[in-house]
Image (cartoon, grey):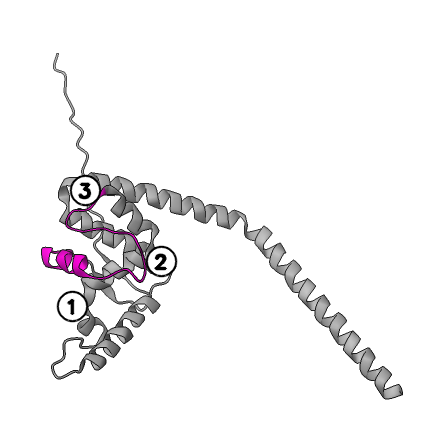
Amino acid sequence: MTTATTTETTETTNPPRTFKDSKGREWDLKLTLGKAKRIDASDFSEITDFEFTVLEPKREFFAHILEDPNLCFAIAWVIILDQVKDKMGIDLDEEGLSDEQREERQAKAEWDFVDSLDGDAMLKGREALMGAFSDFFPEIRTVLSTLMVRWKTAYQRMGNKLKGLGPEIDNMIEAEMEKGLTDLMNRLKTETGTDKKGAND
């Protein structure tokens, strides 16, 4: 009698490394050694006091960027700087620009990018950045994948809770609108009564 032995293998699917913003532009967050060094050399003190290094990351770093969209997409912005000319038509490295002109172009491009990040784009962007880190740190790919799954689960739970509060929120808004309308009508009545009294006098 022959017993067949089946070996199950679990294949880890690499998370996406690209995402589209609300304007339909696709951004590739592929991380290289050069870009990692550029991130570490960047100043993020205006948006966070969290200290980190991409080249020698601690585990809390990955959790932090998922929870902090400002830092997450500031890092993404550093990665995609070389794609700005192609995707936005803004040449940040044009020769002959003064420092002021270069800063103006950078600010314009950065705002264009930030303004294109709606809810769906931010969710996909987080996934893409974690995908880029998974490619760059293959030795911790499983850890990052688990972290992303847990974060998405928590994110979805929060969304479901907010959906459950929908009727309650609607009632609160309706009550506030009715109160505001009542206050306005009472004020108008008072002012109208005062005007009439003054006219009669």
On whether residue 45 falls in the magenta region, the answer is yes
Q: What span is in magenta? A: 31-58
Q: What residue type is labelled 3?
A: Arg
Spot occupied by residue 49 in the image (x, y as percentages of width and height): 30, 54
Image position of 74 with respect to 201: above or below = above
Identify residue for label 1. Answer: 82
The quadrant holding residue 33 is bottom left
SS class, disc 3: helix
The quadrant in which the N terminus is found is top left
Is 198 displayed left or right of 57 in the figure?
A: right
Identify residue for label 3. Answer: 141
Identify the mark nearer the N-term, 3 or 2: 2
Do callouts 2 and 1 mark residues in contact (Cβ within 8 Å)?
no
Counting other residues with Cα less than 10 Å from the Cα at mark 3, is it few (<14), some (14-19), or many (20 or more)? some
Spot occupied by residue 136 in the image (x, y as percentages of width and height): 14, 49
Identify the mark nearer the N-term, 3 or 1: 1
Identify residue for label 2. Answer: 120
Spot occupied by residue 200 in the image (x, y as percentages of width and height): 89, 87
Identify the mark nearer the N-term, 2 or 1: 1
Is 86 displayed left or right of 64 in the figure?
A: left
Identify which residue, 69 or 41, lies in the foreground. 41
Between the residue at mark 2 and the residue at mark 1, the CA separation in whole angstroms equals: 24 Å
Between disc 2 and disc 1, the foreground one is 1
Seen at 74% across and 73% down, the residue is 187
Counting other residues with Cα less than 10 Å from the Cα at mark 1, is it few (<14), some (14-19), or many (20 or more)? few
Image position of 8 with respect to 195: above or below = above
Seen at 30% across and 72% down, the residue is 112
Between the residue at mark 3 and the residue at mark 1, the CA separation in whole angstroms equals: 26 Å
